[in-house]
Image: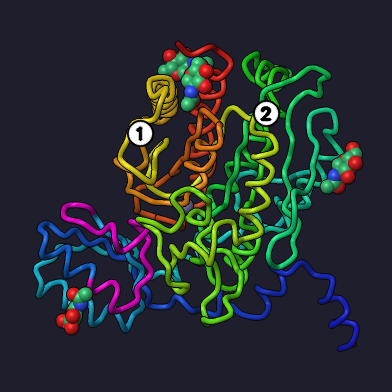
Amino acid sequence: MRKLHRKVAAFLPFWLLFEQAASYLYDNRYAGDKVIRAVPDNEAAAKTLKNLTQQFKVDLWQPGSVSYISKGAFVDVRVSRNTSQILLPYLQQANIQYTVLISDLQKAVEKQSGLKSSRNRRSLPGYSYEIYHSLEEIQSWMYHLNKSHSDLVHMFSIGKSYEGRPLFVLKLGRRSQVYKKAVWMDCGIHAREWIGPAFCQWFVKEALQTYQTDPAMRRMLNQLYFYIMPILNVDGYHFSWTHDRFWRKTRSKNSRFRCYGVDANRNWKVKWCDEGASIHPCDDTYCGPFPESEPEVKAVAHFLRKHRKQIKAYLSFHAYAQMLLYPYSYKYATIPNFSCVESAAFNAVNALQSVYGIRYRYGPASSTLYVSSGSSMDWAYKNGIPYAFAFELRDTGHFGFLLPENLIKPTCTETMLAVKNITMHLLKKCH
Ligand SMILES: *[C@@H]1O[C@H](CO)[C@@H](O)[C@H](O)[C@H]1NC(C)=O
Ligand SMILES: *[C@@H]1O[C@H](CO)[C@@H](O)[C@H](O)[C@H]1NC(C)=O
Ligand SMILES: *[C@@H]1O[C@H](CO)[C@@H](O)[C@H](O)[C@H]1NC(C)=O
Ligand SMILES: *[C@@H]1O[C@H](CO)[C@@H](O)[C@H](O)[C@H]1NC(C)=O
Ligand SMILES: [Zn+2]
């Protein structure tokens, strides 16, 4: 009987095993953790806050790097129970205003996590787009579409991840003998930003469901190809389901340090490892030992180089901030053809806002968010893709990376309009 149980267990999906093994997700490791938003209102406070975040090695949620902490801009950090007991009085003493965004992170993880959603909506063909899916589920979903929608979908791999997983891309669009322009979309460069992969799936679903009925979608799929990579950082995403919900980087090993992973959005060969990137392997914005050191980045860069003539737009999906960004990230400067890109962004954020009134900020990444070197968007732009955008999806910090599943639908619905708007802009001639 025991033996049989064990055998059965071997065939159970891993999330069931997970639930049986522990009543708490992730071994209860976030119990007592808090997410705090601090606002330094003068230079001295900013300096102190910088110092504290470094000293206590807290998990910085926003902005992306310690170097961006500055006067007037909020800082979201995840701190352990013990650290918060020291840090909070410290902030009070230093007269730095703060609010608690999430008071019990373990509870928030349990509440949001896709691991606890109802199972019956996971299996195909009743696949739900309003829950978060594991890597395995997303891959089965892709295989399924490749079979069931072979007229519009073609699935292929562009390489292997550090841990040996295939890097799948969906080519979406009506097959054609004649040359077609293309749009590239990737989600999940940063592992913990789960709303990204949810959007990539949503886009494919909408495209397939409305191809027959929506003239705009029909035009898009007839006149363009979409290369969609639902999860770029597959190892990191998997790790964020099994070990650390707040993992950001890839999972490559460093020979000289005990820390794992590289920031896959600082690893591109464009002003590599300059401002806004870290040379320290233990940092969340570590740029890696050399450009394209990460097999995931190298595979995508290789694909984009090979198709640079065909691909007219590069879209990358992140969270969280509610922003639509375009180049440059790495310097304060205006891109050539600024007005075409700017008007595409302006229209896109207006289209997005028209659904639920959610206002996105938009502009060059450097001045709208912060300066960062080695990003995929800058690289795509520099390699001849004229429309390069990065979305920072919902929200602005209330839930942060733990955006609840009931917000997947509104977030994806509004983002869909923005993406369609950018795409239709592409089909027209700017100027
Ligand atoms: C941070 O604060 C500690 C303790 O007050 C101090 O020793 C250290 O020099 C400070 N570091 C920086 C970079 O300001
Ligand atoms: C997708 O389907 C085609 C046949 O239509 C097949 O040749 C291809 O190998 C499939 N892709 C994957 C990744 O299995
Ligand atoms: C794009 O958005 C703008 C502003 O909301 C709107 O005027 C335009 O009609 C939209 N275009 C498409 C094709 O959706
Ligand atoms: C600017 O636009 C023109 C006309 O569409 C195009 O030929 C040129 O390649 C564009 N330049 C850049 C840097 O995107
Ligand atoms: Zn990101």
Between tags 1 and 2, which lies in front?
1
Q: Quadrant of residue 165?
A: bottom right
Q: Residues within 10 Å of mark 1 (few under 14, many from 20)?
A: many
Instruction: Looking at the picture, tell me which residue is in the foreground, 12 or 306.
Output: 306
Q: Is residue 316 left or right of residue 12?
A: left
Q: Residue at x 84, y 71 (%)?
A: 11
Q: Name the residue tied to disc 2.
A: 207
Q: Residues within 10 Å of mark 2 (few under 14, many from 20)?
A: many
Question: Compared to 270, does 260 lie above or below?
Answer: below
Q: Amino acid at mark 1?
A: Tyr
Residue 421 visible, this angle: no
Q: Secondary structure at mark 2?
A: helix
Q: Residue at x 37, y 77 (%)?
A: 32
Is residue 6 part of the magenta span, yes or no?
Answer: no
Q: Is residue 304 left or right of residue 321?
A: right
Q: Is residue 134 left or right of residue 196?
A: right
Q: Quadrant of the N terminus?
A: bottom right
Q: Name the residue tied to disc 1.
A: 362
In the rendering, at what x and y percent does residue 192 appear?
A: 51, 59
In the rendering, at what x and y percent does residue 90 appear?
A: 16, 77
Q: Quadrant of residue 64?
A: bottom left
Question: Compared to 96, does 328 lie above or below?
Answer: above
Residue stretch rendered in magenta on the structure = 51-73
